[in-house]
Image (cartoon, rainbow, N blue to C red):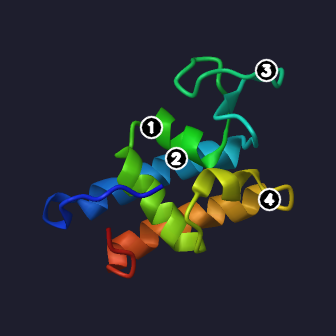
Amino acid sequence: MTAPNDTNTIDREAIAAKLDEARALVERGWTQDNFAQDASGQLVVSNSPEAVCFCAAGAVGRVQAPWWESLAALEKAVGTNNIVVWNDAPERTQAEVVEAFKRAAAGLRSGEITL
């Protein structure tokens, strides 16, 4: 799921800050098998004003984080090559997804995660 990029132009702190924003959304409401849901559990697009629950990728989209770099950081934080599949695994929990965002942001800030 990661795309090639020029690592000299990536602002890791800006991406980490966006991941923090996305994490806050997932903390308030998380979903699987959809990018976003409204309060009644209906599928909505992640930028909908009615969206209250988000999957990992949906939260990244909602905060308008750099798409490929943000997903790559999340994937590296949890050791997967597809954060959408990881998020949607039946055994996955909201707490694990929140932790993935925390680890990805911290890893970008420390340099442990490179893009």
At mark 4, the secondary structure is loop
Question: In the image, which disc is placed on residue 108?
Answer: none
Q: Label 1 vs label 3: CA separation? A: 20 Å
* Label 1–label 2 contact, CB within 8 A: yes
**Image position of 84 with respect to 95: above or below:** above
Q: Label 2 vs label 3: CA separation? A: 20 Å
Dividing the picture into quadrants, the one containing residue 115 is: bottom left
* Label 1–label 3 contact, CB within 8 A: no
Q: Label 3 vs label 4: CA separation? A: 20 Å
* Residue pointed to by mark 1: 63
* Residue pointed to by mark 4: 93
* Residue pointed to by mark 3: 42
Q: Label 1 vs label 2: CA separation? A: 6 Å
As drawn, is 90 to the left or to the right of 111?
A: right
Q: Position of residue 33 (x, y in %)?
A: 75, 39
Query: Residue at the spot x=52%, y=46% of the render?
Result: 22
Tag 4: amino acid: Thr
- Front-most of 72 and 27? 72
At mark 1, the secondary structure is loop
Q: Residues within 10 Å of mark 4 (few under 14, many from 20)?
A: some
